[in-house]
Amino acid sequence: MASSPEKKQKTTSISSTSSLLRFYRTPAFTAHANRTLLAHLRAHVADGLQVDELVTEYCFYVETKADAETLSAADQETLHWLLSETFEPQQTRPAEPFLATSSSNEWLVEVGPRMNFSTAWSSNAVAICQACGISSIKRIERATRYLV
């Protein structure tokens, strides 16, 4: 019996020479949207479980091009401005998330696109960065983090 050749699966991943930066912004949703989601969650949670609170944040994954190890201070400042809410810039920061579990009764769930393909949102975000003079960004993806 002849053996079949192994099929190699083509995968796309972030190259080891590029850099992945993270920016976090809280809250991800308006107060009304958060209350609506919390009510929906409470209505569908399993018997015996109780959901007291729902807190959200966005995580922006910023991948730089291979030839750009890091962003300059000016580029980081511009990127921070682009990712922040105009009226709450202090609610956005690099590297350190706002949300973290403090007990075994809390869950931190992150929902976002897989990092092996680019979304339309990313293409638009990169185009905006390039229009603002930041040419070293390859892609930006946004995930939503939920602390329940």
Image (cartoon, rainbow, N blue to C red):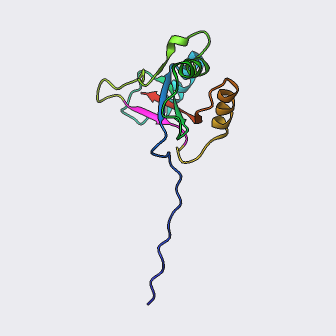
* Span of residues in magenta: 107-113
Q: Residue at x 52, y 27 (%)?
A: 71
Q: Residue at x 48, y 80 (%)?
A: 4
The residue most toward the bottom is 1
The residue most toward the left is 104
Nearer-the-camera pick, 142 or 82: 82
Percent of width and height locating residue 72: 52, 23
Percent of width and height locating residue 64: 54, 35
Left or right relative to 69: residue 122: right
Q: Residue at x 52, y 56 (%)?
A: 11
Quick check: 93 above or below 148?
A: above
Count of numbered labels shown in the rendering? 0
The residue most toward the top is 87
Nearer-the-camera pick, 126 or 33: 126
Image quadrant in which the C terminus is located: top left
Image quadrant in which the N terminus is located: bottom left
Quick check: 57 above or below 138?
A: above
Magenta segment includes 120: no
Q: Residue at x 41, y 21 (%)?
A: 52
Quadrant in the picture for residue 138: top right
Percent of width and height locating residue 31: 56, 16
Percent of width and height locating residue 114: 53, 44
